[in-house]
Image: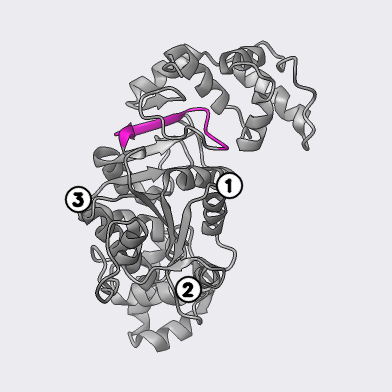
């Protein structure tokens, strides 16, 4: 395929800016057989490609009308220029290092900062898991990230809080290669608490999105993002997942693409490990240490005893032992302050101060005297 030209990339950006245009609707739109530029120009002109009938999904006609109105105000060349001024590069099929050739649901294009070649360099491992992880899960993710980074393996995550962020803290601490696949525009850091981590990944690794700059977070974009994580990975490792955690969507996408899925065993009493333990029951290989992943990548032999996962975090996290205890407790559900007081053994004033710091960081929320998981856990 010939290299994608800038004009074609501008049309791809234009389509990617249309609201609600996820993978399924994109497949429908492109099923007309028209080129990307033809589809984009048709929508700019206020009509669908001739080969398409009326949309059949709920609120389809109203959404298509919104597409017409928005596309009319967009210019492909202006979109490309805006990304260039933001320091964000754009690639599409036929571009150098395009990593989604042959994928069943490829993105129209990707925006990126850093080195796109990392996306096609092998081997690659995605480390995924719940945002509401335990301290042990966070440490395991960081240890796996560091061990894989030291072995020259690129580590992929969605740069969410919890397991994702810990895995990238680990790989960066080892001087390894980090790939972050996010569900917003590259100028919209989500969650905001990960701003420093985003910047570091963009600086020394690869920060990638299928969305143009300015794209705000929406719930549907993150499951869509998960298919890209699965596509880029040779192996997907799930560190912790609740019974119906979002990480299991990445597992489904990995299985669809024939990728190997592995899981870290967890306590049967921990809700944060219910999903991973079920994956083991379903036949996924266990991860007892980084060596198990390296063996699955054919980078290590099975000789000798397994070295256990390093229980120490890559850097002090969270800020105190009391905060670590609180995160562990809320990892399995809401907990009353009286129970935290009994478990921690600290004075009530000290406990409340720690909780307040965590509320401000978005790690927990308060509902009266009950502590709940926060938006950034």
Give, as a single range, the part of the protein colored magenta: 104-117
Q: Compare marks 3 and 1 and give the one earlier in the sequence.
A: 3
Q: Secondary structure at mark 1?
A: loop
- Between tags 1 and 2, which lies in front? 1
Label 1 to label 2: alpha-carbon separation? 23 Å
Label 3 to label 1: alpha-carbon separation? 32 Å
- Between tags 3 and 1, which lies in front? 3
For residue 351, what is the image quadrant?
A: bottom left
Q: Compare marks 1 and 2 and give the one earlier in the sequence.
A: 1
Between residue 324 and residue 361, name the one nearer to us: 324
Q: Secondary structure at mark 2?
A: helix
Q: Compare marks 2 and 3 and give the one earlier in the sequence.
A: 3
- Between tags 2 and 3, which lies in front? 3
For residue 357, what is the image quadrant?
A: bottom left
The residue under label 1 is 219
The residue under label 2 is 330
**x, y percent for residue 181:** 42, 43
Between residue 325 and residue 275, name the one nearer to us: 275
Q: Residue at x 33, y 57 (%)?
A: 167
Is residue 34 shown above or below 260? above
> What's the mark number on residue 114?
none
**x, y percent for residue 345:** 34, 88
Q: Secondary structure at mark 3?
A: loop
Instruction: Find out whether the residues at labels 2 and 3 contact each other: C-beta distance under 8 Å.
Output: no
Q: Residue at x 70, y 14 (%)?
A: 46
**x, y percent for residue 225:** 51, 43
The residue under label 3 is 175
Q: Residue at x 26, y 67 (%)?
A: 313
Between residue 284 and residue 199, name the one nearer to us: 284
């Amino acid at each position: 395929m010939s290299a994608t030209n800038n004009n074609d990339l501008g049309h791809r950006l234009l389509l990617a800016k249309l609201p609600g245009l996820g993978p399924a609707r994109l497949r429908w739109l492109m099923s007309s057989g028209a080129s990307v530029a033809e589809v984009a120009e048709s929508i700019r002109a206020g009509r669908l490609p001739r080969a398409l009938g009326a949309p059949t999904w709920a609120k389809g006609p109203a959404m298509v009308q919104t597409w017409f109105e928005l596309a009319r105000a967009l210019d492909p060349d202006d979109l490309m220029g805006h990304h260039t001024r933001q320091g964000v590069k754009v690639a599409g099929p036929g571009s150098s290092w395009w990593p989604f050739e042959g994928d069943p649901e490829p993105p129209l294009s990707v925006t990126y900062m850093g080195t796109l070649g990392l996306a096609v360099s092998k081997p690659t491992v995605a480390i995924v898991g719940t945002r509401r992880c335990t301290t042990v899960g966070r440490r395991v993710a960081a240890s796996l990230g560091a061990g894989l980074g030291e072995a020259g393996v690129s580590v992929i995550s969605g740069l969410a809080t919890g397991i994702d962020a810990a895995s990238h803290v680990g790989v960066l601490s080892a001087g390894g290669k980090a790939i972050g696949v996010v569900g917003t525009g590259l100028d919209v850091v989500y969650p905001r608490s990960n701003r420093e981590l985003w910047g570091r990944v963009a600086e020394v690794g690869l920060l990638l999105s299928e969305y143009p700059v300015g794209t705000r977070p929406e719930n549907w974009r993150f499951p869509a993002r998960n298919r890209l994580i699965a596509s880029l990975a040779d192996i997907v490792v799930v560190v912790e997942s609740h019974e119906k955690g979002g990480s299991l969507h990445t597992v489904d996408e990995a299985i669809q693409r024939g990728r190997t899925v592995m899981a870290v065993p967890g306590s049967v009493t921990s809700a944060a490990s219910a999903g991973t333990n079920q994956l083991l029951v379903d036949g996924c290989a266990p991860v007892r240490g980084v060596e198990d992943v390296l063996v699955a990548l054919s980078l290590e032999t099975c000789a000798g005893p397994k070295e256990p996962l390093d229980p120490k975090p890559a850097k002090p996290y969270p800020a105190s032992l009391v905060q670590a205890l609180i995160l562990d407790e809320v990892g399995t559900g809401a907990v009353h302050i009286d129970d935290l007081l009994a478990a921690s053994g600290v004075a009530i004033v000290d406990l409340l101060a720690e909780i307040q710091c965590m509320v401000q960081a978005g790690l927990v929320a308060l509902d009266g005297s009950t502590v709940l998981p926060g938006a950034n856990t």
